[in-house]
Image: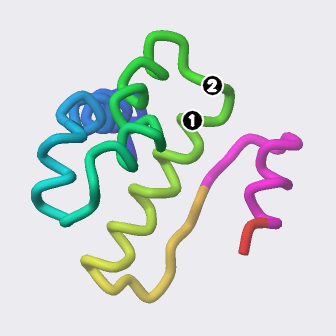
Amino acid sequence: EIDIEKSLDEFKSYANELDSEKLSNSLGIPKDLIDAIGINDLSTIFSNPPPGIDEIIGLINIYNLAKEYQYERIVIDTAPTGHTLRLLQLP
């Protein structure tokens, strides 16, 4: 079972660690280009998270687990709502 709150907190901590100066140095991309993308603003999005961010974090966790453990099947038990239907339509 995936703990979405814990996963969201982990994602927030990764986002808070993003720094345009470090990214510029490690990727060799000009800092002004990274600043124009708004990397430093990414951490502020979690003060009022947009709708659906928990589903995205859940999907990232499912993907990582599937990749790491090579499961034969993955069962996703969801509520029967429009959100689930949209999830199933994703590529």
Colouring method of the image:
rainbow
90 and 33: which is toward the camera: 33
Q: Which residue is mark 2?
A: 50
**49 inside magenta stretch:** no
User: Is 33 situated above or below 69?
Assistant: above
34 and 49: which is toward the camera: 34
Amino acid type, residue under disc 2 in the picture: Pro
Amino acid type, residue under disc 1 in the picture: Ile
User: Is 42 situated above or below 45?
Assistant: below
Quarter of the picture holding the C terminus: bottom right
Residue range of the region highlighted in magenta in the rendering: 77-89
**For mark 1, does the 10 Å Cα neighbourhood hold few (<14), some (14 to 19), or many (20 or more) residues?**
few
50 to the left or right of 62:
right
Find residue 55 and report its horizontal and vertical position in percent: 59, 43
Find residue 58 and report its horizontal and vertical position in percent: 49, 48
| Residue in the image at 34% along x and 30% along y | 40
Q: CA distance from mark 1 to mark 2?
A: 6 Å
Contact check, label 1 and label 2, Cβ < 8 Å: yes
| Residue in the image at 77% along x and 64% along y | 88
- Name of the residue lying farthest toward the top: 47
| Residue in the image at 45% along x and 11% along y | 47
Find residue 1 and report its horizontal and vertical position in percent: 39, 48
6 to the left or right of 58:
left
> What label sits on residue 17 in the rendered view?
none
> In which image quadrant can residue 90 be found?
bottom right
> In which image quadrant can residue 19 be found?
top left
Element on which disc 1 rests: helix
38 to the left or right of 30:
right
| Residue in the image at 12% along x and 61% along y | 26
**For mark 2, does the 10 Å Cα neighbourhood hold few (<14), some (14 to 19), or many (20 or more) residues?**
few
Q: Which residue is mark 1?
A: 53
